[in-house]
Image (spheres, rainbow, N blue to C red):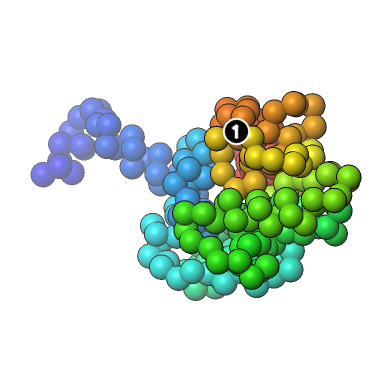
C-alpha cells in the first residue's frame, strides 16, 4: 500500500529522506559507551557517518586493555570490534604523563591509586589517584606534564593513528570543581587556571581528546 502511494506521487516523506541519508552513511563503531564522547564525535563527524556505540552492536564485553602505550590499548579495542563484529571501528585511550615520573601514570592513569596499593571506591577514585600523584611529587620542582590521547582507527582494512597532546604543569593542591580525573591539578600552558576551573567549553577547545578527534575527523572527511 505504501509502495503504491510512493510510486504514484512525487511526495517524499520525512522518513524517506531519513532512509536515503542513512543508506548513504557509512557505519563506524566507536569502541566506547561513554555518552559524552559519543555525542561529541557524532556532532563532529556529521551526516557522512553513522557512529554506533559498543552497546548499539550488542558488545557487552569489557574489552581488555593490556598494552603499555595508549596506541596499543586503543588498537586492541578497535581490533576486537573488527574481529568479533566485522565493523570498521575506532577507539581511544588517554591519560596523564608526568615528566619527573618518567611518563607515569600513563596507561595506568585510571587505576594509579590501585596500582600503588590504595583502597579505592567508585566515589573516591579520582581523589585517590590525585593524592598518590601529589605524594610522589611532594619534593619535586619539575612539575611538567601532559595529557595525551591516542585514537586508533581501522578503516577499509588499514590501521591509522591520531594523537592529541596538551602540555602544561601540575600544581601542589587541587583547584576547581569541573571536569574529571586529574583536571583539578593540571594547568595547560598559556592559562593560569586548572582544567577543572576553566570549564568544559574552554577545555574542549584545547584538550588532548579534542585534538586527536579533530585529526580523526579531518581524515574521515578526506576519504
Ligand atoms: P580514558 O582513556 O579517556 O578513559 O582516560 C583514562 C584515565 O586518564 C581517566 O580515568 C583519567 O584518570 C585520565 N584522564 C584522561 N583524560 C583526562 C582529562 O581530560 N582530564 C583528567 N584526567 C583525564
Q: Which residue is mark 1?
A: 176
Apparent side of residue 83 relative to residue 144 in the rendered image (left or right): left
Q: Quadrant of the N terminus?
A: top left
**Is 108 situated left or right of 38 in this image?**
right
The answer to whether residue 59 of the structure is visible from this angle is yes
* Label 1 beta carbon within 8 A of ligand 1: no
| Residue 34 picture location, percent across and down | 47, 51
Whether residue 164 is visible to the viewer of this picture, yes or no, is no
Residue in the image at 79% along x and 38% along y: 168
- The image quadrant where one finds the C terminus is top right
**In the rendered view, would you say 87 is above or below 164?**
below
> In this orientation, which residue lies closer to the viewer: 212 or 10?
212
Give the number of callouts. 1
Residue placed furthest toward the right = 141
Q: Residues within 10 Å of mark 1 (few under 14, many from 20)?
A: some
Q: Is residue 173 above or below residue 122?
A: above
Q: Secondary structure at mark 1?
A: loop
Residue drawn 20% across the image and 37% down it: 6
> Residue at the spot x=52%, y=45% of the render?
37
**Residue 206: where, in percent of width, then height?**
69, 33
Toward the viewer: 28 or 195? Answer: 195
Q: Quadrant of residue 221?
A: top right
Q: On the picture, is 203 further left or further right than 6? A: right
For the point 62% across and 30% down, which residue is it? 197
Which is more toward the observer, 33 or 122? 122
- Of 86 and 43, which appears nearest the observer? 43
Residue 122 image position (x, y, % from top left): 47, 58
Q: Where does the image place residue 15, in percent across and percent down from the top left?
A: 27, 37
Amino acid at each position: 500500500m505504501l509502495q503504491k502511494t510512493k510510486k504514484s506521487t512525487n511526495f517524499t516523506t520525512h522518513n524517506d529522506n531519513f532512509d536515503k541519508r542513512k543508506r548513504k552513511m557509512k557505519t563506524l563503531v566507536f569502541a566506547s559507551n561513554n555518552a559524552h564522547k559519543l555525542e561529541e564525535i557524532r556532532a563532529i563527524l556529521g551526516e557522512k557517518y553513522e557512529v554506533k556505540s559498543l552497546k548499539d552492536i550488542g558488545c557487552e564485553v569489557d574489552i581488555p586493555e593490556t598494552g603499555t602505550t595508549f596506541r596499543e590499548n586503543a588498537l586492541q579495542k578497535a581490533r576486537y570490534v573488527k574481529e568479533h563484529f566485522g565493523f570498521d571501528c575506532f577507539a581511544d585511550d588517554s591519560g596523564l604523563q608526568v615528566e619527573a615520573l618518567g611518563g607515569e601514570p600513563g596507561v595506568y592513569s585510571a587505576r594509579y591509586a590501585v596500582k600503588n596499593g590504595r583502597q579505592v571506591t567508585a566515589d573516591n577514585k579520582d581523589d585517590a589517584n590525585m593524592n598518590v600523584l601529589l605524594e610522589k611529587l611532594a619534593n619535586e620542582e619539575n612539575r611538567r606534564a601532559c595529557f595525551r590521547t591516542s585514537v586508533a582507527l581501522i578503516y577499509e582494512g588499514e590501521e591509522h593513528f591520531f594523537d592529541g597532546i596538551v602540555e602544561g604543569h601540575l600544581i601542589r593542591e587541587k583547584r576547581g570543581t569541573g571536569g574529571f580525573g586529574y583536571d583539578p591539578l593540571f594547568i595547560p600552558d598559556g592559562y593560569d587556571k586548572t582544567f577543572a576551573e576553566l570549564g568544559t567549553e574552554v577545555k574542549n577547545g584545547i584538550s588532548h581528546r579534542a585534538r586527536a578527534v579533530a585529526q580523526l575527523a579531518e581524515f574521515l572527511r578526506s576519504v
